[in-house]
């Protein structure tokens, strides 16, 4: 296997394309705490955010394969552990060493605060718990939402003198966003798989319409209530944080655009009818990007428009180019 194919295989294992979704939270947490985007310590947290994503998602890929879920999923036979591009023992060793390095690096960044170290341990325990037990519990969204949200809150906490209403509202918006992504988006993506699923418990299913020769997705009233409530709450806390910053109307207007797009793709992914998995994943990917961007908008009064624009453009360029390299398309990952 040549260098390019080998690199692509490892990036697929780490699901590198979505590092753009978690890493900016670490950047914004540090920037808001410091009061500026342009500080070398923001760069240190960017490194952490990328490491967090690679290690966490790499562990998830290996554990899901090792426990048999991805081995038996016909849609994931192109993944590197199934194709043999990466040997299981090599993956286990690389992820184990990377996990130790991540923990040591984060401990270095937070060693000056007992609370910071405590939050670090909580984040690690929550993330590992999700990776190893998430397939067996319908409440798997909770531990990973805790872990992902702490990616923002820990760097913010390390550089601030007080926890403000603005930070509480923004942190809560991120938490709700992550709950939705796992409990709704993730479970729709794998609704036909043999694993614990909240939406399956609440009535979601895939059935075959032999007359039309298509798979049909069916939801339920309970699922729609939960999904739309989470979306509205994410919007409410996002706009609440924007309002509490008492800046101009322009960040709110931009946040409104992202809110509308978030709601639009929430509606798209929940529609009953023909189940084209790739199309649903496209809606999920867009919804995730728009939802994150909506919450990120609350940081504009602190970091400024130029920094926000740089962040958003970097997210788009990274997501598109890395997705194209490892999956062959600009937006819809083959996961």
Image: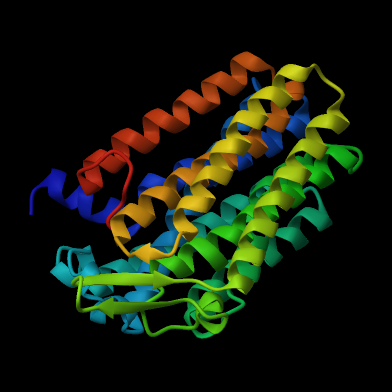
Residue in the foreground of this view, choosing between 18 and 26: 18
Would residue 113 appear left or right of 227 to someone viewing this image? right
Near-viewer residue (83 or 69): 69
Q: With respect to residue 66, does 167 lie above or below? A: above
The quadrant the C terminus occupies is bottom left
Q: Is residue 305 left or right of 9 when viewed as pictured?
A: right
Residue 186 visible: yes
Name which residue lies at 53% across and 75% down: 199
Q: Which of 124 and 295 lies nearest the eye of the viewer? A: 295
The image shows residue 194 at horizontal and vertical percentages of: 38, 85
* Residue 317, image x, y percentages: 38, 28
**Numbered disc total:** 0
Measuring from the top left, give residue 37's x and y in whole percent. 66, 23
Query: Which residue is at 73% across, 40% downward?
Result: 238
Residue 41 at least partly seen: no
Residue at horizontal 77 percent and vertical 53 percent from the top = 116
- The residue under the point 46% across, 59% down is 271
x, y percent for residue 311: 54, 26
On screen, residue 315 versus residue 282, left or right, reads right
Query: Going by the picture, which residue comes out furthest to the left?
Result: 1
């Amino acid at each position: 296997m040549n260098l390019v194919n080998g690199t692509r295989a490892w990036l697929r294992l780490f699901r590198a394309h979505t590092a753009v979704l978690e890493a900016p939270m670490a950047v914004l947490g540090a920037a808001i705490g410091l009061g500026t985007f342009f500080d070398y310590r923001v760069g240190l947290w960017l490194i952490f955010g990328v490491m967090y994503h690679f290690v966490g998602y790499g562990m998830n890929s290996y554990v899901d394969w090792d426990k048999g879920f991805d081995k038996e999923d016909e849609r994931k036979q192109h993944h590197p552990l199934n194709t043999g591009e990466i040997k299981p023992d090599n993956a286990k060793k690389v992820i184990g060493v990377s996990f130790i390095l991540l923990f040591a690096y984060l401990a270095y960044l937070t060693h000056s605060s007992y609370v910071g170290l405590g939050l670090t341990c909580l984040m690690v325990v929550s993330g590992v718990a999700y990776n190893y037990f998430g397939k067996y519990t319908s409440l798997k969204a909770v531990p990973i939402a805790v872990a992902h949200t702490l990616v923002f809150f820990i760097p913010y906490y390390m550089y601030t003198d007080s926890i403000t209403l603005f930070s509480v509202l923004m942190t809560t918006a991120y938490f709700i966003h992550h709950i939705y992504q796992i409990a709704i988006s993730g479970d729709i993506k794998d609704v036909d798989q043999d694993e614990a699923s909240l939406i399956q418990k609440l009535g979601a299913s895939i059935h075959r319409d032999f007359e039309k020769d298509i798979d049909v997705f069916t939801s339920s009233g309970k699922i729609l209530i939960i999904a739309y409530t989470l979306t509205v709450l994410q919007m409410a806390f996002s706009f609440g944080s924007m309002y509490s910053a008492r800046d101009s109307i322009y960040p709110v207007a931009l946040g409104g655009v992202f809110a509308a797009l978030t709601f639009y793709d929430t509606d798209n992914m929940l529609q009953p009818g023909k189940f084209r998995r790739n199309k649903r994943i496209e809606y999920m990917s867009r919804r995730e990007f728009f939802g994150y961007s909506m919450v990120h908008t609350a940081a504009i009064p602190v970091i400024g428009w130029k920094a926000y624009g740089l962040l958003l453009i970097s997210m788009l360029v990274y997501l598109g180019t890395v997705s194209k390299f490892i999956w062959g398309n600009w937006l819809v990952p083959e996961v």
